[in-house]
Amino acid sequence: MVKKELVMIKIKDLVEYPNNTKEHTPEQIQAIRDSIISLEDLDPIQIDEDNVILCGHGRRSAWYQIDSTGEKEVEALRYIGLEDGVKKAWRIANNKIPMMTGFDLEKLGKEFNLLEDTDFFNDTGFTIKEISELWDKKESTTELIEQDKTSVVEHTCPECGNTWEEEFKKSRKRE
């Protein structure tokens, strides 16, 4: 049975998973850092029983920008008893699954309207330019939602080196 517990742990005691597949740009780390400072750390780093990060490598890097000594204690959600396969799959799934969707532009625009006069407007990860472009969109949200979205992913077999492309087609309709 898997046990989980919320713990306080020094940044320097969080162990990076050496095969972490998610890339973090300096801009993303800065955005995470800014979010932690202004919105608090509402998303604890997830670790296993050996303090190896399951999810939160970017947050660990952002914390180091806040406290370069690594002495600060941060919240972490520790999972005890996960199988190695589950750990590996969760690291990938936690990053990939959120990338499979977009935003409801109508609702997103409304949320930005409500945030506009607050101290949190700039803490969403969106740039002012992106928000302005969202507000300036000439195309209606309904038309955007009904458009078919197609993406092509190239795969390479790690054993034989053969490559192939796979096409994904997503279509959303609003009722």
Image: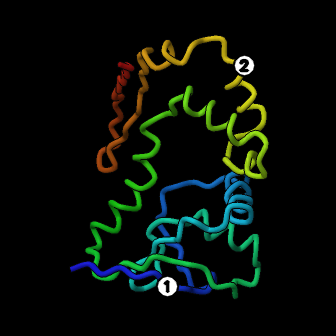
Q: Quadrant of the C terminus?
A: top left
Comparing 66 with 103, the one in front is 103
Residue indicated by mark 2: 136
- Would you say the residues marked 2 and 1 are in contact, meaning their CB atoms lie under 8 Å apart? no
How many numbered markers are drawn? Answer: 2
Outermost residue, left side: 1
Rendered view: 12 above or below 135 = below
- Residue 93 or residue 35, whichever sits in front: 35
Residue 7 is marked as: 1
* Picture residue at 40% right of the left edge, 46% below the top: 97
Q: Residue at x 49, y 12 (%)?
A: 143
In the rendered image, the vertical position of residue 6 relative to residue 140, given as above or below: below
Q: Position of residue 104 (x, y in %)?
A: 51, 30
Q: Looking at the image, which is closer to me, 123 or 90? A: 123
Relative to 161, residue 145 above or below: above
Taking 23 as reference, is 101 left or right?
left
In the picture, which quadrant includes the N terminus?
Answer: bottom left
Q: Residue at x 73, y 51 (%)?
A: 120
The percent coordinates of residue 49 (x first, y second) are: 39, 85
How far apart marks 2 and 1 lie (CA) works out to 44 Å
Q: Position of residue 53 (x, y in %)?
A: 48, 73
Dot 2 alpha-carbon crowd within 10 angstroms: few under 14, some 14 to 19, many 20 or more: few
Residue at the image position 28 percent from the left and 66 percent from the top? 86
Q: Which quadrant of the structure image shows residue 133?
A: top right
Label 2 secondary element: helix
Q: Amino acid at mark 2?
A: Asp
